[in-house]
Image (cartoon, rainbow, N blue to C red):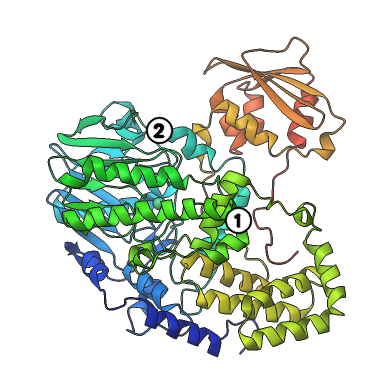
Amino acid sequence: MAVSDPGPASAHTRAAHAHAAGELPFEDREDFEDAKRGLVATTPNLVVRDARGRAVWDMDSYAFLDSREEPPETIHPSLWRMAQLNGTHGLFEVAPGIYQVRGYDISNMTLVEGRTGVIVVDPLISTECAAAALGLYRAHRGERKVSAVIYTHSHVDHFGGVKGVIDEEAVHAGEVPVWAPAGFLEHAVSENVLAGTAMARRAGYMFAPSLAREPRGQVDAGIGKTTSSGSITLIPPTHDVTFTGQEEEIDGVRIRFQLVPDSEAPAEMNFGFPNLGVLCVAENAVHCMHNVLTPRGAAVRDALRWSKYLAEAIELFGRHTDVMFAQHHWPRWGKERVIEHLARHRDMYRYLHDQTLRLANRGLTPTEIAAAVRLPPSLERTWSCRGYYGTVSHNVRAVYQRYLGFFDGNPAHLDPHPPVEAGRRYVELAGGIEALLANARHAFAKGDYRWVAEVCSHAVFAEPTHADARELHAQALEQLGYQAESAVWRNLYLVGAHELRDGAPTTPTGRRVASADVARALSIEQLWDAMGARLDGPRAWDVQIVLAWNFTDVHEQWTVSVENGALSSIRGRLADDADATITLTRTAFDAVLLGEGDGALFASGAIAVAGDGEKLGEFLGLLDDGDPAFAIVTP
Ligand SMILES: [Zn+2]
């Protein structure tokens, strides 16, 4: 076996799995019943391809999950359970007139039959997957036209495939309304702008498209198998939901909305169908613990409001609901079971929130709180509260971060050395790298993989070419990955091991949301903010540039200046003392930003520059492109 191949599970890992198998209620198979209930049709060997024939979604690659009953030694038995559940795919009836296509992307497409056609709730990430899902529905329910689209929230797996189900022209013509929670468009585009490159890279480790799909590789993503890699689109909503209690009739279907901003997403909504006894909880109560702070990175979410919204949902909808569904995982039937599920998730997020603050107020720091908090047994033994996606460990640290920040209060942690400098000192402290690795090997033999990873990380940052240090570090991360119940922790560990052995992955880095539609939906202010975050500060220290921008089609005027290494932008003014004045349309500006024939746009006069045109060139030359393939576990 080559040194770069993933290894077997250690005796300690096998023992940890055996312990988990004995602790958890595997005899409870209700979720397997619910995941298959209402199956209308499925597609054997499901692979969705783009126009060039490239596979953008491949369920066939997960066939190994069905080939055996017992979990492989390299997968946590509970994650194995979820990986099998998420492997179920096809068209399912949720209630009369309400269907779901599941397993055609990481998220679900829900289809609600109306008077004249069908309402599509959440058109997945990619147009190719969305079109295939709608095609499966139509093959079994007839050629119904899409009469409306509803986006439950502002994450890309709930809107990106929209042009696979409707044309933008039909929306502009007023033929197809697109409904979304208030604030949807701003948040749909903003979350991925300022820190987008870093988030996409980190998402590549969290969802692990670079890993093989096999028992020692990528097996799941907790809320679905993985993210699809087709074309991302966006059609801005035409209708907003602005308050809880708002009722609408959409294609003849009565829908009552609950607006839940700053829950799982900054713009999100739940809704009930009062005439049908059906509730949609978007992504606020799925069949696992969700993230208070996603490991790919994002603004931290509000666990307290999240919990309160679920309490409110029970009040608003509980008595009238016979079946609930979410936009990931499978539905849950029965009034009592629905209320029980919502109440458990209400209490889970509240418990994480309250216990973190209780312990913080007793002086515990984030890593101490992570070690101290466990869920009550009533929740811990509930499958839908297991940490397949979020974990207790990182969610309590997220709650701490929301209230108290990254600093734990200990001045020894105020100004630490960065990783390479710290690594050199730890190696020296250990008495050299061989002595450090001897300590690490001793810990490895005892199964203390967290410690091995900590000290080997110092060794690798101190001496990145040291082959034994890299391999021992990789072996520790690998066992941690095999032991992880959270699919995304597993992915982070295993891609880390992969980077140590084979170098940082250059293959797809997960979600790509810098699509043309998303760029066009940004406000001009958001574009300046994005440019500011790309400005190479030190190179701009001594630069002074003032540019006036006159957008003739959208009637916006801006003055953008660089001074003291920082960008600032003022709306509604063209500076008299500008170095240059640029007259253009937003359309032409978008074309330049998307790299579509910028020279021709200047030549044709679509962009006209008066004054010192070299200042515009100097400004653009100060923008940093970022690094979409940066290394993470090595320097
Ligand atoms: Zn989602």
Give the structural element (helix, strand or loop) at label 1: helix
Instruction: Please give the count of numbered marks on the rendered protein.
Output: 2
The verdict on label 1 being within 8 Å of ligand 1 is: no
Residue furthest to the top:
576
Q: Earlier in the sequence, mark 1 or mark 2?
A: 1
Q: Nearer the viewer, residue 281 or 397?
A: 397
The image shows residue 367, relative to residue 116, as above or below, that is below
Name the amino acid type tagged 1: Arg
Residue 113: percent from left, percent from top: 16, 44
Taking 169 as reference, is 423 left or right? right
Q: Which mark is residue 629?
A: none
- Left/right of residue 341 with respect to residue 95 in the rendered view: right
The span from disc 1 to disc 2 (Cα, nearest Å) is: 26 Å
Which label number is shown at residue 236? Answer: 2
Location of the C terminus (image quadrant): bottom right
Q: Secondary structure at mark 2?
A: loop
- Residue 185 placement, left or right of 317: right
Identify the residue position indicated by label 1 in the image.
201
Q: Residue at x 34, y 29 (%)?
A: 240
Is the distance from the Cβ of mark 2 to the nearest ligand 1 atom less than 8 Å? Answer: no
Q: Position of residue 157 (x, y in %)?
A: 41, 50
Amino acid type, mark 2: Pro
Q: Quadrant of the N terminus?
A: bottom right
Structural crowding at the residue carrying mark 2, measured as other residues with C-alpha within 10 Å and reported as few (<14), some (14–19) or many (≥20): some
